[in-house]
Image (cartoon, grey):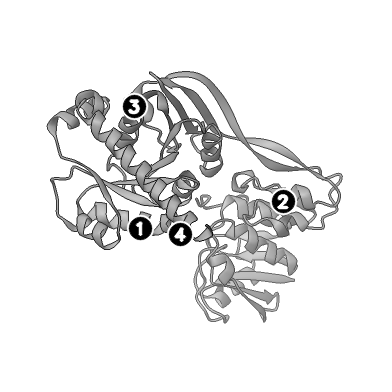
């Protein structure tokens, strides 16, 4: 089972939900922090990091003594990372997405690979929970290949909780892709609603079922609830605006550490998600039988 | 000899566009000041990244020798340099006036980019 936690708006409580959900499930869970630009799960969990691996992307290196200036490499590149111009073939490694097309197409075999460091993937544990996080190199613009490297460490025997970055662009899509369910964390404000709508619209084409966790649920207005009803998004858990939770968070403590009564609620959330996923796979199989 | 000028419109009387890679049009003229070709740069205007690199490529393909523009970033400059295209940056005003200024020897060529790379 793979459950992604996303939001649209930043600061709604994705990491709060992801860490407490994983910690509530204990040894059954693995948490993967896919917010590689600003991974925060480690702050709340203080995991023991056991290994760290540098992740690189293969970018082209041209041997000009072999290049016949045919320009095929530049034609196949969608990102202007390689270009035959004048009497030379230039590379712009920071533009490269690492597809390898230019190397495959070069008739003179003049292009070899040179690595560009994207960041690191670290693995370890918090108590019984397996912990994985990606950390992008400062200055690196391309998060998706690093997110894929984080997801390569996904343990199929565990309940994987993937903490997504905020927003609704490539890093979010790369995180949630392949998940069985997406928990959308939001707050009942016009900002929370606005960004939730965008994220739902972005994720919907992937066909992954979604549900909503409403954080700071007793502030703001009722528009998010109304929207959830209209969009048929189940409202799965409400976390009220609580001084004790906020104080714990401000000291880097997980929600279930300051409020242990939430363990049951998060286990309940997981059971609701599993039921939803099971029901869906049953109805999906029906037409075939 | 061909001279390229980044332009907001399709004629020699159009105001220049200060951007190189994302100018709507690039006007090609000869050294007699006559219009030879108008490149519709729409594809690069909407490119996610690499607009300057692709614009440099289209000038190189046409055998342009001189570019008159406002801003030129590092990747575009590298590409233009490799193609042997001289860059007169920080130019502004109407296309035909910039062309005239160049023909009278009033344009100094840049040794490097004068804009940041775009992200």
Q: Is residue A105 visible?
A: yes
Q: Nearer the viewer, mark 4 or mark 1?
A: 4
Of the numbered discs in the image, which one, if any, rests on residue A101? 2
Q: Residue at x 69, y 66 (%)?
A: B59
Q: Give the alpha-carbon distance from disc 3 to disc 2, as whole Å.
A: 43 Å
Q: Earlier in the sequence, mark 4 or mark 2?
A: 2
Q: Which residue is mark 1?
A: A198
Q: Which chain does the numbered disc 3 sit on?
A: A
Q: Earlier in the sequence, mark 3 or mark 2?
A: 3
Give SS at disc 1: helix
Q: Is residue B73 left or right of residue A44?
A: right
Q: Earlier in the sequence, mark 4 or mark 1?
A: 1
- The crowd level at tag 1 (other Cα within 10 Å; few <14, some 14-19, many 20+) is some
Q: Which residue is mark 4?
A: A205
Q: Is residue B62 left or right of residue B70?
A: right
Q: Is residue A250 left or right of residue A165?
A: left
Q: Nearer the viewer, mark 4 or mark 2?
A: 4
Q: How many marks?
A: 4
């Amino acid at each position: 089972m793979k459950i992604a936690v996303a939001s649209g708006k930043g600061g709604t409580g994705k990491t709060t939900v992801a860490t407490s959900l994983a910690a509530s499930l204990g040894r059954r869970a693995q948490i993967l922090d896919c917010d590689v630009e600003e991974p925060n799960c480690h702050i709340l969990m203080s995991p023991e990091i056991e290994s760290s691996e540098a992740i690189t992307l293969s970018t082209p290196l041209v041997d000009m003594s072999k290049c016949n200036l045919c320009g095929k490499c530049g034609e196949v590149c969608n990102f202007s990372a390689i270009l035959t111009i004048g009497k030379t073939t230039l590379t712009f490694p920071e533009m490269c997405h690492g597809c390898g097309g230019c190397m495959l197409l070069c008739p003179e075999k003049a292009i070899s690979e040179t690595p560009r460091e994207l960041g690191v993937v670290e693995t370890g544990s918090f108590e019984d929970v397996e912990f994985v996080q990606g950390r992008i190199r400062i200055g690196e613009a391309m998060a998706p290949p690093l997110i894929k490297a984080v997801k390569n460490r996904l343990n199929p025997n565990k309940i994987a909780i993937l903490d997504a970055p905020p927003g609704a662009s490539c890093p979010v899509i790369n995180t949630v892709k392949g998940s069985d369910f997406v928990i959308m964390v939001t707050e009942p404000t016009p900002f929370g609603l606005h960004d939730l709508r965008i994220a739902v619209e972005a994720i919907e084409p992937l066909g992954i079922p979604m549900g909503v966790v409403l954080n700071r649920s007793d502030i703001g207005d009722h528009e998010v609830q109304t929207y959830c009803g209209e969009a048929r998004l189940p409202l799965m858990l409400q976390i009220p605006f609580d001084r004790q939770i906020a104080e714990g968070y401000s000291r880097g403590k997980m929600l279930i550490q300051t409020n242990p009564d939430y363990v049951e609620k998060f286990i309940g959330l997981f059971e609701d998600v599993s039921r939803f996923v099971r029901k869906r796979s049953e109805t999906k199989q029906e037409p075939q039988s | 000899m061909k001279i390229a000028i980044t332009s907001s419109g399709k004629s020699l009387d159009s105001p220049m566009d200060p951007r190189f890679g994302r100018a709507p049009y690039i006007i090609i003229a000869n050294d007699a000041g006559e219009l030879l070709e108008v490149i519709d740069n729409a594809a690069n205007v909407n490119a996610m990244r690499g607009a300057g690199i692709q614009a440099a490529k289209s000038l190189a393909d046409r055998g342009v020798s001189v570019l008159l523009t406002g801003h030129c970033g590092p990747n575009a400059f590298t590409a233009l340099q490799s193609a042997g295209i001289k860059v007169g940056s920080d130019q502004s005003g109407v296309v035909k006036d910039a062309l005239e200024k160049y023909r009278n020897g009033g344009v100094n060529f840049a040794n490097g980019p004068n804009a940041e790379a775009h992200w």
